[in-house]
Amino acid sequence: MKKSLIFLIHGILVFFVLSACQGSASDEGNAEVTYLTVTADGGNEKLVGKTFVFKVKDNLTNDVTSQSLIYINNQMISGNTFTPTEKGSYTVRAEYRDLPINPISVKAVVSSGISFKHRILYEDFTGTWCGYCTIALARHDNLAHQTEDFVFIGIHGPAGTTDPWSNDTGTEMETLKNVTEWPAMFINRNTVWPYDSNYTDMSLPLGQLSAFSKIGIKMKTSGSGNTFTTEASVLFTEDFTHLKIAAFLVEDGLVHHQKNYISSLYGGSSYIYNYVHHNVLRSKLTSSVTGENIPNTQTATSSEYIRAFQYTVPAGYNADKLKIIIMITDSNGTVLNVREEKINTNNTYEFL
């Protein structure tokens, strides 16, 4: 269940009205094993010759991989790994104690020419006041156990709540995605990760992870005092048109008490004291949260686009925990590739 936040402003008084939203059936508090999930570590798409590693869990998050039989296209495999030798899609299912399971599909692909590592973007609209937002936080933790190839942004708010990190950029993001319920979760900006009680099934975000990208991103930072310049370079190894670049400043490792209504998470306590929040959105660096246009003349094969962002770190921010997030989106606003880096660190293109 989620909470909708409705603001009624009268004079100088602000009242908050919370109303429950009907959701799907929940297994919260149910100690009975009723179904299985199977996931592929590191994503559902890999290059031919690369190995998929599968995990099988029950709805209580118990890992039953070693006790399960795993089938690829209805052929049982030995153990829980599979290395495709031909390109194509493969159906994966598992058997354990006759429990129901939804099969997943994995894909083996072939890359031609130069390619780069691909990452997905996970945006979480959250709040320290929001007791149901711990579902989204737990999803972050479980996704991190499955793959390192994602970038997370915690968008705190909305304005007027007790969350200490709400800001104008977060409000602009809420308007962009028409967020009226918390938590709200998106993968690559345009794929909704629906709210429900399941915080262990990572098939939706992993299904968005590709084996490679034809867009590479690198960053280098220089600074003097509390003013920094980050130069973002984007290299294209395929022809593109109508792309945008969006850039954000986030701060990792911020600590605050987190409200919790989910009895199966974090010990079931109503507050998680001193919870460490990840990549909290601080500010946009592009003129709009949707990004800025990249000239088509600079998105052709072998072209490199360079954009510098200068910013001053406000007092109270921990510069050692600040990161720049750079994303490239298509004409529909879908993220094609994304990368993060600490502001005092330079990196290089991640060629495959």
Image (tube, grey):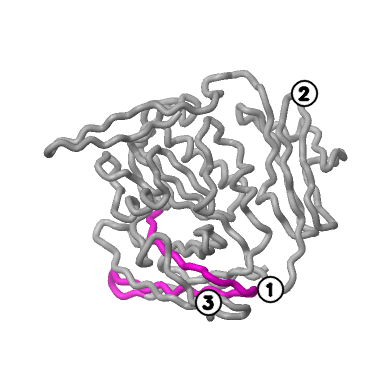
Label 1: how many Cα within 10 Å (few below 14, some 14–19, many 20+)? some
Whole-angstrom CA distance, mark 1 to mark 2, is: 45 Å
Whole-angstrom CA distance, mark 2 to mark 3, is: 54 Å
Residue 130 appears at what percent x and percent y?
Answer: 36, 35
Whole-angstrom CA distance, mark 1 to mark 3, is: 20 Å
| Amino acid type, label 1 | Ile
When the figure is inspected, residue 147 is found, relative to residue 7, above or below; the finding is below
* First along the sequence among labels 1 and 2: 2
- Front-lying residue, 301 or 324: 301
- Front-lying residue, 145 or 149: 149
Residue 73 appears at what percent x and percent y?
Answer: 84, 42
Q: Secondary structure at mark 3?
A: helix
Q: Residue at x 67, y 47 (%)?
A: 41
Q: Residue furthest right?
A: 75
Read off the residue under disc 1.
114
Label 3: how many Cα within 10 Å (few below 14, some 14–19, many 20+)? few
Q: Secondary structure at mark 1?
A: loop
Q: Residue at x 48, y 73 (%)?
A: 294
Read off the residue under disc 3.
296
Quarter holding the C terminus is bottom right
Q: Is residue 231 magenta?
A: yes
Q: Residue at x 42, y 31 (%)?
A: 2
Q: Residue at x 71, y 31 (%)?
A: 101
Q: Which mark is residue 98?
A: 2
**Which span of residues is magenta-colored?**
223-252
* First along the sequence among labels 2 and 3: 2
